[in-house]
Image: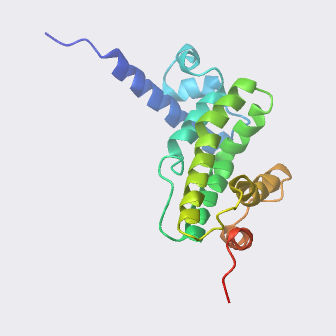
Amino acid sequence: MAKPPNPARRSESSRQAILAATGELCSQVGYGRLTIEAIAARAGVSKKTIYRWWPSKGAVVLELLGETATIATAPPDTGDLAADLHTMLTEIVDILTRDSAGTGVISEALNDPDLARDLRERLIQPGIDAFKQRLRRAQDAGRLHPDADLDVALDLLYGPIYHRMALHLGMPGPAYLGSLITHALRALTPPTPH
């Protein structure tokens, strides 16, 4: 006698198909032209299935971004603070530039309080927590001043990225990020005794 299909498994395969379709469509048409109808057609599901799990296209894209972000789940700690910060900032730049998905979700969140809350809870706050955790370890090791304000450090390092994004100044490349990190760490590092 054949076993009936497992509804949870079927749901997970549909969810994965929806996320894959969303990623493909973002690559092809960008966030602005992405629609729930196109996602449903590409994934082979109904719009109703998508809306059962997500209230908007922004919510679908946010979940996709959350699944590909690694810093919040595994922050780097190579022993080289500058290199670890470079890895963290590079991931943010990648999220913000990948097929306009990151900037699209941020833009939509400005007018959608529920999406803004989800963005903070799922992607932004875990990233901030990972950043502060890494900087606290650097403080404990004596590589950052023990009184360094980690909220200010966050703004010093991440602020320029969002500034460049908001004003269409072009996202920073590796050399700019390296210079940014060098200058910020200079302000946060205890002076060397002579």
Judge whether residue 23 can be spotted in this image. Answer: no
Residue drawn at 48 percent across, 46 percent down: 73
> Compared with residue 8, is residue 65 higher up or lower down, i.e. above or below?
below
Instruction: Name which quarter of the figure residue 34 lies in.
Output: top right
> Compared with residue 71, is residue 177 higher up or lower down, i.e. above or below?
below
- Residue furthest to the right in view is 167
Q: Nearer the viewer, residue 121 or 65?
A: 121
Instruction: Report whether 122 appears left or right of 183.
Output: left
Residue drawn at 77 percent across, 37 percent down: 107
Instruction: Name which quarter of the figure residue 136 lies in.
Output: bottom right
Instruction: Report whether 91 appears left or right of 32.
Output: left
Q: Nearer the viewer, residue 151 or 13?
A: 151
Q: Position of residue 183 (x, y in %)?
A: 74, 72
> Compared with residue 143, is residue 59 higher up or lower down, i.e. above or below?
above
Judge whether residue 182 can be spotted in this image. Answer: yes
- Position of the C terminus, as image quadrant, is bottom right
Residue drawn at 52 percent across, 45 percent down: 68
Q: Position of residue 184 (x, y in %)?
A: 73, 68
